[in-house]
Image: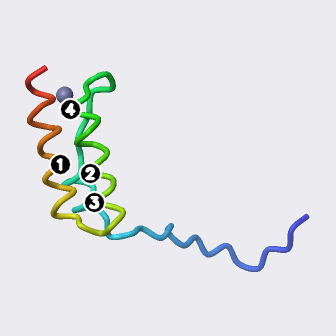
Amino acid sequence: MTTKHKTTQEPPVVLPTGLDAWLLDCAPVKDCARCQSEWRQLNAAKNKGSITKAAKHARNVRDHAGGH
Ligand SMILES: [Zn+2]
């Protein structure tokens, strides 16, 4: 049995990614080369910390997703 002192229920650490998540929200179509290309660039930009650039690609995916 584990020794419990006090069960202080701390809320999980939430990273301030709300805005990023919104900016990068998109649904690339799996078998669409254009979507996948934009999606890859989005992630590459995101990994480099270029959220603005990533957001642009996310927007491209969103725009394209509406035109399938
Ligand atoms: Zn597409």
Q: Is residue 16 above or below residue 65?
A: below
Q: CA distance from mark 4 to mark 2?
A: 12 Å
Q: Earlier in the sequence, mark 1 or mark 2?
A: 2
Query: Looking at the image, do the residues carrying marks 1 and 2 touch, with CB atoms under 8 Å apart?
Result: yes
- Mark 3 Cβ inside 8 Å of ligand 1: no
Residue drawn at the location 27% of the way across and 60% of the way down:
45
Q: Quadrant of residue 32?
A: top left
Amino acid type at mark 2: Leu
User: Counting residues from the N terminus, which is met first, the one under dot 3 or under dot 1?
Assistant: 3
Q: Which residue is mark 3?
A: 45
Picture coordinates of residue 37 (x, y %)? 26, 39
Tag 3, which secondary structure?
helix
Q: Is residue 42 above or below residue 48?
A: above
Farthest right residue?
A: 1
Q: CA distance from mark 3 to mark 2?
A: 5 Å
Q: CA distance from mark 3 to mark 1?
A: 9 Å
Q: Position of residue 38 (x, y in %)?
A: 22, 42
Mark 4 or mark 2: whose residue is earlier in sequence: 4
Q: Are marks 3 and 1 in contact (CB under 8 Å)?
A: yes
User: Under 8 Å from ligand 1: the CB of mark 4?
Assistant: yes
Which numbered disc covers residue 34? 4
Q: Is mark 3 in CB contact (under 8 Å) with mark 2?
A: yes
Q: 57 or 26: which is nearer to us?
A: 57
